Amino acid sequence: MVGWCQRSPARGALGKWRAATPRATGERPLLRRLPAALRAAPPPAARPAPDIRPGPASRPAGNMALREAASGGCSLHWPRVLLFGDSITQFSFQQGGWGASLADRLVRKCDVLNRGFSGYNTRWAKIILPRIIRKGNSLDSPVAVTIFFGANDSALKDENPKQHIPLAEYAANLKSMVWYLQRAGVPGSRVVLITPPPLWEAAWEQECLLQGCRLNRLNSVVGEYAGACSQVAQDCGVDVLDLWTLMQKDTQDFSSYLSDGLHLSPKGNEFLFSHLWPLIEKKVSSLPLLLPYWRDVAEAKPELSLLGDGDH
Amino acid sequence: MVGWCQRSPARGALGKWRAATPRATGERPLLRRLPAALRAAPPPAARPAPDIRPGPASRPAGNMALREAASGGCSLHWPRVLLFGDSITQFSFQQGGWGASLADRLVRKCDVLNRGFSGYNTRWAKIILPRIIRKGNSLDSPVAVTIFFGANDSALKDENPKQHIPLAEYAANLKSMVWYLQRAGVPGSRVVLITPPPLWEAAWEQECLLQGCRLNRLNSVVGEYAGACSQVAQDCGVDVLDLWTLMQKDTQDFSSYLSDGLHLSPKGNEFLFSHLWPLIEKKVSSLPLLLPYWRDVAEAKPELSLLGDGDH
């Protein structure tokens, strides 16, 4: 919320207002629809000539405050959530994407960083992971990591040998990555494995035909990889989001979750986010809101509120 | 794109395919609508029992490869774009938000970090900026920074003295921030100032009344602050996106750009992104795609492709 008027409502009303403010709800703006009468635009105002008197031209007095702030306040540590995966991760900030939804939900608490690599399988992912998360810097250690591969690994060997990874190696690669993270200071309690979503073969076959090749994946095979992923999670004691199973639960029509038979549609993004959020939330629940809520900033001496102890 | 079949089309077709692939276009999935016949879902497949032989239970052989990768490959430097502002920035990862659109457009090139602080004005922003961007670490220096304040500063003093900032101080604060960034290693060529959007008074007044107060902003006053912001940009030699003017250009109806008279609607987010992108693009145009396109990974020895020179 940008802000309201100064006059406070009565104490009782204030309590209610504070409880309903964006502070408690993620600080969302009010997006409710307005009466039609209000939707008529006022005529654009001509901009008045600016009346700026910014003080000395070379260095305004404010720079002193900046220097004081730099010396008096601690650098803010901004925690990170890492999304590591293939194209379904790389595309997760498209409109309505599950990555963007996470970033929005976690605003002022941590960054959500996209480490999705379109087309990659776990053999390649395992090689690059140490370039993405280094050992030895606990401050850089993410508070949560999603590992979301399998859609490429499960490609049929005969039709797509470049991306295909044998089932046993897929499982071993996932285990390697979980173990690497642990050695890099990311305990298993911060890790979520995500299985590939089910494949809608009819639609994906159309995509393949458009590229001059035959259907190169089968849903039943993807299911084997999803099972292996779940088994690895169980073996390693980490969370798993079994998308393949959840999207087919109770024989539901999962076609609407996919845009091209393989990647997620807007509805699929929403589905993934709704199931992933509870797993992420428990890993980040202790994170504070970074820097104070604007109503809590001391008006006369804002530095007292804003140059805090490093976290908030 | 997760991936296709192995068989390559003919050379001519390959060139065409490569040009049209996600590599060139931002690697977007194909979201076109599919024929109705394809939308009928296949019956969910029962998941086959996983057949996993991941090697030794304690430490799979893959860990050796991970250690080799960690020692042989350089840590990837992931550039950053920082969005510094008030609630219009903080909410920019909501569905269709301009921040999420930037992050999607820049995926595999840099992170887009939300440093939006709902309700903040430039007096407070100036104090916290050194806690967000420290001097002395050129690697951490962002490749682009947006500074987007004014919607709170321009609140009417009598109705909202807590957030109100006098016009001259607003301009001085913006200058201070640009100068601080320069001393912190972020030259003006990487900075974009954004003026507050126009205020749709009728709608915002309704919001104010709902909170028990009177209209606490005026569009004409916001226009003065927008003018001051543009003047600062000119004085400092940095880019400016004058949203206040652009949204009212040619006496257009700007009401649809706002959700509550002050914050951006989905259409307003799209408008902002479409005008901001050209300014950001020229600052990040030299950034490489991080890590190789999947078709370029050497199949027999993927390490050769993936353990690169530190950047890509």
Image (cartoon, coloured by chain):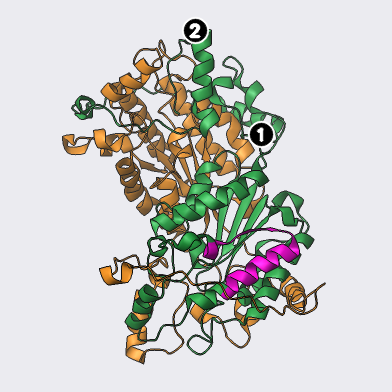
Chain colours: A green, B orange
Q: Chain of mark 1?
A: A
Q: Is residue A106 above or below residue A163?
A: above
Quadrant placement of the C terminus of chain B: bottom right
Left or right? Give the position of A231 relative to A90. right
Left or right? Give the position of A253 relative to B75. left
Left or right? Give the position of B75 relative to A217. right
Secondary-structure class at tag 2? loop
Residue at image position (37%, 35%) is B195
Main secondary structure along the magenta-highlighted residues: helix
Q: In the rendering, at what x and y percent does residue A117 appear?
A: 53, 68
Q: Chain of mark 2?
A: A
Q: Which residue is mark 2?
A: A10
Q: Can residue A55 be seen in the rendering of this structure?
A: yes
Secondary-structure class at tag 1? helix
Q: Which residue is mark 1?
A: A70
Q: Nearer the viewer, residue A36 or B111?
A: A36
Name the kind of residue labelled 1 in the image: Ala
Q: In the rendering, at what x and y percent does residue B262 appear?
A: 35, 29
Q: Is residue B8 above or below residue B99?
A: below
Residue at image position (51%, 51%) is A273
Q: Which residues are magenta?
A: A224-245
Name the kind of residue labelled 2 in the image: Ala
Q: Is residue B79 magenta?
A: no
Q: Is residue A240 magenta?
A: yes
Residue at image position (52%, 47%) is A103
